[in-house]
Image (tube, helix red, strand yellow):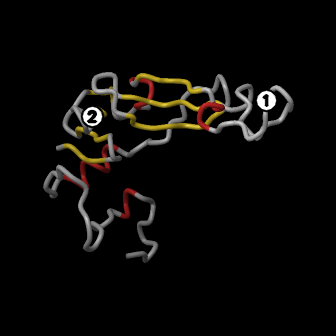
Amino acid sequence: MKVIVTEYLRIDLDTEQWECRRCGHVLGPARQNYKVHTRVYARDPREIHKPLLDATRYEYTYAPDPAWCAILEFYCPACAALIETEYTVPGHPPINDLELDIDCLKRQWAEREELSAPAGGGLPPQVDHACHGHAGSGRP
């Protein structure tokens, strides 16, 4: 069973692997940070946020200082789909922005049909409150 997580990421619950939704390339174990299995491009933040003032005349140009700001782009190594972009500080390891409870996902999707595209409209799926720490809270 493959579960859509983001526009370009899904998890294969049978193999517990991250996959690129565009090409199906396996990106590594779903219990780890998918970013360490991608191609990373460290952008100069001044390319993205152009200086508003002439850098030859002014020390501060309203562009991010690359000594303080890093922009990392994470790409699928097989098809080059841009999976994620992250603003961080230089030298910081990739942020683990998706840490999912794989065992809970397996229980939630055991009775569902696999989706090839995100479901649109209608009511959201029922939430297993035991997986989200809401057991006994009275929340629907």
Quadrant in which the C terminus appears: bottom left
Task: Classify mark 1: residues with Cα within 10 Å, few (<14), some (14-19) or many (20+).
Answer: few
Q: Is residue 83 above or below residue 36?
A: below
Quadrant in which the N terminus appears: top left
Labelled disc at residue 126: none
Q: Position of residue 80 (x, y in %)?
A: 34, 27
Q: Position of residue 35 (x, y in %)?
A: 44, 29
Q: Position of residue 22 (x, y in %)?
A: 25, 37
Q: Is residue 140 left or right of residue 125?
A: right
Q: Nearer the viewer, residue 31 or 21?
A: 21
Mark 2 sits on what residue?
16
What amino acid is labelled 2 in the image? Glu
Write the residue at 86% across / 29% down. 57
Disc with the residue nearer the chain's start (1 vs 2): 2
Write the residue at 44% across / 42% down. 98
Q: Is residue 45 left or right of residue 30?
A: right
Labelled disc at residue 55: 1
| Foreground tag (1 vs 2) | 1
Q: Is residue 116 above or below residue 61?
A: below
- Secondary structure, mark 2, is loop
In which image quadrant can residue 103 be found? top left
Q: Position of residue 41 (x, y in %)?
A: 50, 24
